[in-house]
Image (cartoon, rainbow, N blue to C red):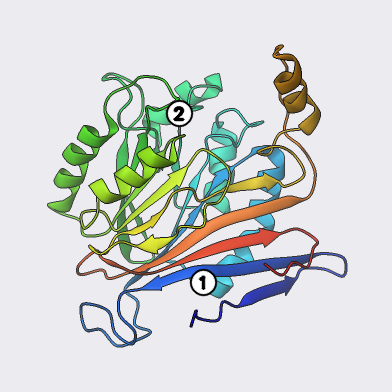
Amino acid sequence: MAAFRPLFIFKISENTYRTIHESGTACLGSSQDRTGSPEGVIDIKVLFIGDIVGSTGRKALKASLPELKSKYNPHIIIANGENAASGRGITSAIANEFFNWGIHGITLGNHTWDNKDIFEFIDDEPRMIRPANFPPGTPGRGYTVIKANGKQLAIVNLQGRTFLPAIDCPFRTADDIVETLRQKHKCILVDFHAEATSEKIAMGWHLEGRASMVVGTHTHVQSNDDTILPGGTAYITDTGMVGSKEGILGMQRDAVMYKFKTQLPARFQVDEGKWQFHAVCVDMDEETGKARKIQKIRMYEDEWRMD
């Protein structure tokens, strides 16, 4: 019989309700994990937030973080910020805003360079990473170690090549970086920013037992395959997005539909409708780096929803 999956609803104001839906929880064992730690003992808890899209996504992030912190008590919070500035890249001001709200690390993706402001600060911001398989000499870094609340988490950013630009091989790059990190760090998060589900699933299996969690980003649609692989790697094909649920992948509908129907150029702008918030929370063993539990999070603005 499938386990009961609870729905959590927070009242923010008289007119605004927020819903957290936990689904697809997977654990290593029933009452104990593979290290033999008692049930409920968690060494490190990581909250990873999907692609934050424009001002709508930023508004949702600011409003939601206090409740998420209260409920999940994450030691470290990582977010994908490559769409944070009008859906195209990120600025220094926005990155600092995220850090001030409680984000500890930011990953990027194929829109990394869309905002020219990035070149002014990416080399000097150790808490932000861009895909590590960008060509040699590219500004910024592809991995870093985040330290917060007495915990350490190595984070790696990779970009897929299927239906995206032909950059360096993400699998070989992952091998080099993860093996280097494993010499000093047990807990490793990999954000694989990719289009094809098959390429993402392949990366999950490729890093099984070597990374603590492999989370997909880029498609803005949260997948329903969150699991813990046999080697102790928490995995989800796509974490989803933080942005308007009334648009198309966070952008205004009319321009997107116009382009599909006419095949003519159209300027996409961030939709300002009611938002949705997608994330995952992973509990992992600090001594082994193995994940014990993964929880999918779905939140909606001003709406009661029974999923």
Residue 65, by quadrant, is bottom right
Quick one: which residue is furthest to the front in this view?
Answer: 1
Instruction: Decide which of tag 1 and tag 2 comes sooner along the chain.
Output: 1
Is residue 8 placed above or below 165 in the rendered structure?
Answer: below
**Quarter of the view holding residue 43:** bottom left
Q: Is residue 282 visible in the rendered structure shown here?
A: yes
Tell me the SS state at disc 1.
helix
| Residue 126 seen by the camera | no
User: In the rendered image of this protein, does residue 174 appear above or below residue 298?
Assistant: above
As drawn, the label of residue 121 is 2
Rendered location of residue 142, percent (x, y): 32, 35
Q: Residues within 10 Å of mark 2 (few under 14, many from 20)?
A: some
The reply, left or right, for residue 126 in relation to residue 272 is left
- Is residue 2 found left or right of 293 in the rendered image? right
Under mark 2, the amino acid is Phe
The residue that mark 1 highlights is 72
Q: Nearer the viewer, residue 42 or 208?
A: 208
Q: Amino acid at mark 1?
A: Tyr
Q: How many marks?
A: 2
Whole-percent x, y for residue 15 in the image: 87, 65
Residue at horizontal 51%, vertical 38%?
A: 218
Depth check: give the residue in front, 122 or 212.
Answer: 212
Residue ID at (72%, 43%): 56
Q: Residue at x 21, y 84 (%)?
A: 36
Cα distance between the residues tagged 1 and 2: 31 Å
Q: Nearer the viewer, residue 191 or 305?
A: 305
SS at circle 2: loop
x and y percentages locating residue 243 in the rendered image: 67, 45
- In which image quadrant can residue 231 be found? bottom left
Looking at the picture, how far across and down is residue 37, in whole percent? Answer: 25, 84
